Amino acid sequence: MPARNTNTRNAMRSHILCHERLNRIQSLLDRYGNPITVRDFSRRFAIFNWELEQAENLGWIKIIERKPHVGRPSVVVEKLSETQSAKLPPFRYAIPKEISIRHWRFALESVSCSGFKLTLRVQAYLRAFPNARSRAGASASASRLMKRTDVKLMRRWLFCQINHEVTGDMPRTVSGLIEQLAPLGYIRYRLR
């Protein structure tokens, strides 16, 4: 199987195959015939290699490398006829969304900056969002970001890391942050 496509747009998206994308893969195989090359999936239909790999691991499709007598080999995807033991992936709404890289950078900058509180927020916002048009707009946006749940949780996690209360990498989802901070007594509410 070729290397996974690391598109910048999908760099922060969690790489978990959802039920809707699996249905799309199966409908494409039904509509355009069996088999379809992996190259066609990525170029014509915007289905990435990691989605095909996960669908194969779940038991819905089969990825085969065909080697002709003359020419380059091709990697094709075939639909399996026997799928009784195949597992269904979760629906899209059940997969937790990852926190934006810009929000993550803002939380990191707001913890690492020192100075007067209002200036600190604006300075952190300007570092995380360098294309801000005005300082007043940056101040308003920084105040809005400080009220977000994900930013509050990331800031709390970073302060706990400074105090050596947590170890390892920061979780990339709100539910992951809540799982790590709840035993420490910093979470007073439950995730809906």
Image (cartoon, helix red, strand yellow):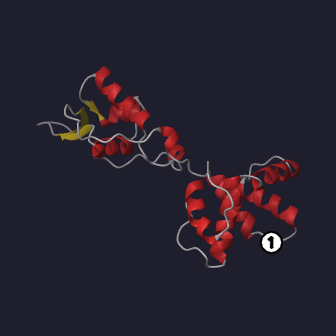
Q: Residue furthest top?
A: 31
Q: Position of residue 65 (x, y in %)?
A: 20, 41
Name the one closer to the observer, 32 or 14. 14
Residue sitting at 76 percent across and 61 percent down? Answer: 124
Name above or below for residue 55 compared with residue 26.
Answer: below
Left or right for 56, reference 124: left
Q: Nearer the viewer, residue 7 or 167?
A: 167
Residue at image mark 1: 114
Task: Name the quadrant containing residue 179.
Answer: bottom right
Instruction: Look at 24% across and 29% down and name the residue there.
Output: 35
The three-letter amino acid code for the residue at tag 1 is Ser
Horizontal side of 32 relative to 126 (left or right) equals left
Could you tell me which residue is drawn at 26 percent across and 23 percent down?
33
- Is residue 172 visible to the viewer in this orientation of the structure? no
Q: Where, by quadrant of the figure, is residue 40 drawn?
A: top left
Residue closer to the observer: 9 or 184: 184
